[in-house]
Amino acid sequence: MALLNRILLTALVTACVYGASAQRIKTTIVDPDRIPAREVISNLSDEQLLDEVQRQTFRYFWDFAHPVSGMARERSNRAYDYGDEVVTTGGTGFGVMAVIVATERGWITRDSAARHLLKMVRFLSKADSYHGAFPHWLNGSTGKTIPFSRKDDGADLVETSFLFQGLLTVRQYFDGNNPAENELRNRINGLWNEIEWDWYTRGGQEVLYWHWSPNNGWAMNFPLRGFNECLITYVLAASSERYPVSPAVYHRGWAQSSFFKNGKAFYDITLPLGFDYGGPLFFAHYSFLGLNPKGLKDAYADYWEQNRNHTLINRAHCIVNPNNYKGYSEQCWGLTASDNHQGYNAHSPDNDPGVITPTAALSSFPYTPEYSMQALKHFYFTLGNKLWSEYGFIDAFSEEHNWYAKSHLAIDQGPIVVMIENYRTGLLWNLFMSCPEVRNGLKKLGFSSPYIENE
């Protein structure tokens, strides 16, 4: 059945790329915006290797984009009965930032990128939303909600914030005075201004809630308290001009929990915030694809120190390797949420089944460039015949269990492209932090940052 699913998926991707996506793929013979799959290439310089990894990983969001909506598919395989139509809101936010990288580096033309993104935001303008917020999953053809779970069949505020971290960055990049880019910006502004962030305080409570459904109301009952991947949700909620939340929602909601402040040392590395050992590494990635942690401080933490130390703790655990898992080393590290040999889980030092997820180390390039490069070279040159594929690295692997994923996930592939670019040029950080609404929101919440020092 797994083999059959892979065959069906290959046929589907071929049909999508060479058939239905006619607006993007002009011909089945020569397309200047199609990025060919390649085998592992030996003797690459460090810069060439970074190019290779970013470029191939970006293919997930370009060649494998949903042919109708242009949004990012949840995953490259058909596990868990997701079906072929499932597109992901948050993963699309990561993907549109990868489109910016590809445009800037000349892998696709600016016009092709703008038209692709415009198709996407036109689709979103008609898709299901709830008080302006989108669900976790949409049907990529119809725009109808696909429930994430039985009661999670409405808005997902966190996924929406990941989407708009990306779309606001797109708005800042595509600043040309032409019909496509003008409409793109206008539509993004329209969608952004319609999000009723204050609705998600559930009647004026001093905290944001993750979910709301017209069928189930607040039944999911998940208040957003830190520290985890949701910092960007509070920043954007405070940044809204039409439906903002007050600073009290941040200070008394997000920053008040038994797992917010830490201050303890793990492997002799101090962790300012969050769970012991830091939790999965995506906490240091998702909110910080656009939100630049360099010099970002508030009353609770220096976020560069937080993210770097979290990464160092994660790596140190893999080096110490208390469970004696095969393959763990200074070159082979990185625990975060991904597929594994038993399904899917959020891996971390205190939830370690022996599975390494490449996005963990590679999306940490800004924080630990030397160590991330060691991991990249190991993944590519040493293990590449098992890990490298048409959309970059596979999602995860375990030498301990002799298991190698047959999947890619949007939320894992996107941060690789984006965070490597932030390490190399700061492109996405500079664009997102140039948003006047974001700078005002950060000031409102009491943050300091080099981007707002002189305002």
Image (spheres, helix red, strand yellow):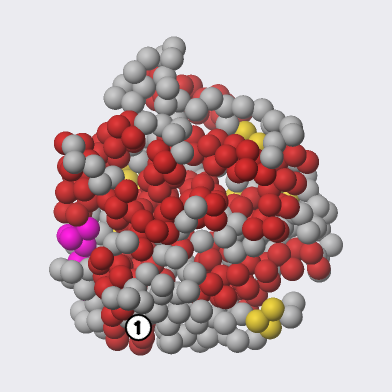
Instruction: Indicate the quadrant containing the C terminus: top left, top right, bottom left or bottom right.
Output: bottom left
What is the span of residues highlighted in magenta in the rendered image? Answer: 192-199
**Residue 102 position within the rendered picture, expressed as x and y whole percent measured from the top left:** 44, 39
What secondary structure is the stretch in magenta mostly built from? helix
Please determine whether, in this image, residue 246 is positioned above or below residue 406. Answer: below
**Residue 421 point in image, percent of width and height:** 51, 50
**Quadrant that contains the N terminus:** top right
Residue hosting label 1: 446
Question: Image point 19% across, 54% down: which residue?
Answer: 189
Residue placed most toward the observer, 377 or 244 = 377
Q: Please say if 222 is above or below 407.
A: below
Question: Vertically, is 415 above or below 442?
Answer: above
| Label 1: few (<14), some (14–19) or many (≥20) C-alpha neighbours in 10 Å | few
The front one of 187 and 49 is: 49
Residue occupying the point 37% across, 31% down: 109
Q: Is residue 112 left or right of residue 296?
A: left
Q: Is residue 116 magenta?
A: no
Examine the structure image and report whether residue 198 is included in the region drawn in magenta: yes
What kind of element bears circle 1? loop
Give the residue type that dot 1 points to. Answer: Gly
* x, y percent for residue 410: 48, 46
**Residue at image location 61% in from the left, 53% down from the top:** 362
Whether residue 438 sits left or right of residue 148 in the image: it is left
Residue 361 visible at all: yes
Q: Position of residue 6 (x, y in %)?
A: 56, 29
Vertical arrangement, residue 222 with respect to residue 23, above or below: below
- Give the residue drawn at x 31%, y 21%: 22
